[in-house]
Image (tube, coloured by chain):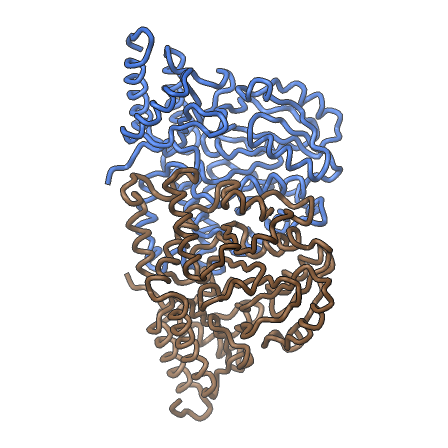
Chain colours: A blue, B brown
Amino acid sequence: MARVHNFSAGPAALPESVLTQIANEMLDYQGCGMSVLEMSHRSSMYQQIIDDAEASLRRLLDIPQNYRVIFLQGGATLQFAGIPMNFMRTGRAGYVVTGNFAKKAWKEAAKYGDAVKLASSEDTDFDRIPALAPVRERASAGDLDYVYICQNNTIFGTMFHELPQCGDAPLFADVSSCFLSQPLDISRYGLVYAGAQKNAGAAGVTVIIVRDDLLEDGPAFAQTPQYMDLRLQAQKGSMLNTPNTFGIYVCGKVFRWVEETGGLEAMAQRNWAKANLLYDLLDNSQIFHGTAQKDSRSIANVTFRTDSDELNAQFVAGAHERGIENIKGHRLVGGMRASVYNAVTMEDVEALAAYMHEFEAEHAPSPRSL
Amino acid sequence: MARVHNFSAGPAALPESVLTQIANEMLDYQGCGMSVLEMSHRSSMYQQIIDDAEASLRRLLDIPQNYRVIFLQGGATLQFAGIPMNFMRTGRAGYVVTGNFAKKAWKEAAKYGDAVKLASSEDTDFDRIPALAPVRERASAGDLDYVYICQNNTIFGTMFHELPQCGDAPLFADVSSCFLSQPLDISRYGLVYAGAQKNAGAAGVTVIIVRDDLLEDGPAFAQTPQYMDLRLQAQKGSMLNTPNTFGIYVCGKVFRWVEETGGLEAMAQRNWAKANLLYDLLDNSQIFHGTAQKDSRSIANVTFRTDSDELNAQFVAGAHERGIENIKGHRLVGGMRASVYNAVTMEDVEALAAYMHEFEAEHAPSPRSL
């Protein structure tokens, strides 16, 4: 078995030790005589699994007691509607549009009320996080139910390096692709949520962390599907109905692995070391260039390209031959993308960097050592 | 490793051979160097997995070409809202209330329009499928957008043995707990859907099979969350966003296993043999009795009890000591329940039957051989 260098943007690389544990427990979870896949979600055994997952996550992020953790299904896309349906009480909320998923969230919210675009970087093809002063100014009017951001923009390789000031409005963030890449001060948010398929585990789990006072009144919209009613889901401990039991189990394993390998500070250091190896290479390359503006660069998704679509395709094909996989950029933007999530090792990144050097030596207009 | 006799109502027993395959492929799926858990849902490798799963299901159920297969998340509970949001066009639909989940679906639908209760067995604690003539009569008025049933009632151990006549209204069925237990003539339905965590695979996958003409106009409600828009999901091949990739992979394995072990006719024979072993025992017992009326009995969930809560608890505790697990009835009804889904073997059922004989011999008022 030869494992490849997997730079997928999600579902994405998982730690080998986690996969090994999962394989070993597949027919018999810790001597109980059945697989987690076969376990009633109402059993005490499974309750322990979901409780342990939550406890581990609470330790990792130091989640304050007045925040609830909910494990749902349906991904970010379901929450694009779920957030306005639950929280657009006066009918107006603010959105910062920094990429594809932020834009989708903003458009979906417009079905349920006045979704105000507070700032956008679409004019420069989402290559940056826009100036946040307009967000503070608009929020100071005090008429927004919440301010929504997509904190890391997977497709465009950008990330908020500071958070907007939102006045009295709570800040809501889709943190899918930077979740557990680095510490996160939960107390600065009203709600964060993350599709787990990047850094946190398996596709099909959405982790929602929400301040409990925001749940008190139930959903803003009477026609909110019961499944999407976050107050109800919190009351039911994510078990209004059968959750993605196996996915939550995988997440729990990943949370423990992050704890055991040093927690989020250590993870952030390693992640920046990996990302910066590539950013430095890009900044010194004659043929590759990063697509995100420097002060907006992501810790998790390094996007780059050459000036030639043909050369990009050639690079991706050559990567595949070297066991470097999922390096192709998102279909909306082309080029290349290396997602350097937690489970991607420095060795993986070094293999990619070595190939980039090799490719550059072959294709640069005036070959030189980088 | 000793595997237990697992009678869980869902998530439920899976074939050992399927679990073994999953374990073996956990770090390296068929030589590709990564786990299915780590695979981009946009990769050709994953597309093959979901395509194979659908093709296998189409063969198993002989699904007509004008039906679409969609793999979603959120379970039946999300579809309780999704169905009226998509299909309640004139604002009125009919519901047959035969149990807890049927009642939840009916109540949820009432958020979106006039959900007419066509028939109910609540007056006898859902111990039967009610007479269906009133459904035919009411449907003949021609003003129902659809007629909804829950075909097998997991908690109460009942199942429709004939389908209601619905006039021009399409029949919609939640078939979660009898899905793949027996053949299903898809052409008689407008839509069927099933939570996969019973017979079909992993929790966190909902399989929806829907006649394509019903999707033509898009959702009935403008405020339907994009994720729940079945036309859109069908257009996107269940990949509007990241699906439960691993769960669908497990389902595909289970579908293949059903094909390889003889298909749905063979499965139905084996399932009735297992269920009837228990029903016959119940019909001849002095202390146990089945809770479902005979003409409404389920192929999948055998519900029974003694007349004493104490004795029920004693039976469940003794079962556990014998490696017979998840035999306790649903918390709403108490007593016992043995779910004899496809992956539950005749040996499992014989072990349970032997224990029931033993228990009866010990506790019957006048012990006798059954």
Does residue A259 appear in the picture of this structure? Answer: no
Q: Name the quarter where the N terminus of chain A is drawn.
A: top left
- With A83 as the anchor, is A222 left or right in this view? right
Residue A119 location, quadrant:
top right
Q: Position of residue A184 (x, y in %)?
A: 52, 31
Residue A101 location, quadrant:
top right
Outermost residue to the top: A366
Q: Position of residue A150 (x, y in %)?
A: 56, 30
Does residue A116 appear in the picture of this structure? Answer: yes
Q: Nearer the viewer, residue B118 or A147?
A: B118
Outermost residue to the left: A1
Identity of the residue drawn at 39% across and 77% down: B273
* Residue A173 vertical position relative to residue B273 in the rendered view, above or below: above
- With A236 as the anchor, is A178 left or right in this view? left
Q: Position of residue A176 (x, y in %)?
A: 51, 35
Identity of the residue drawn at 41% across and 31% down: A341
Q: Nearer the viewer, residue B56 or B127?
A: B56
Identity of the residue drawn at 43% across and 50% down: B248
* Residue A302 vertical position relative to residue A370 in the rendered view, above or below: below
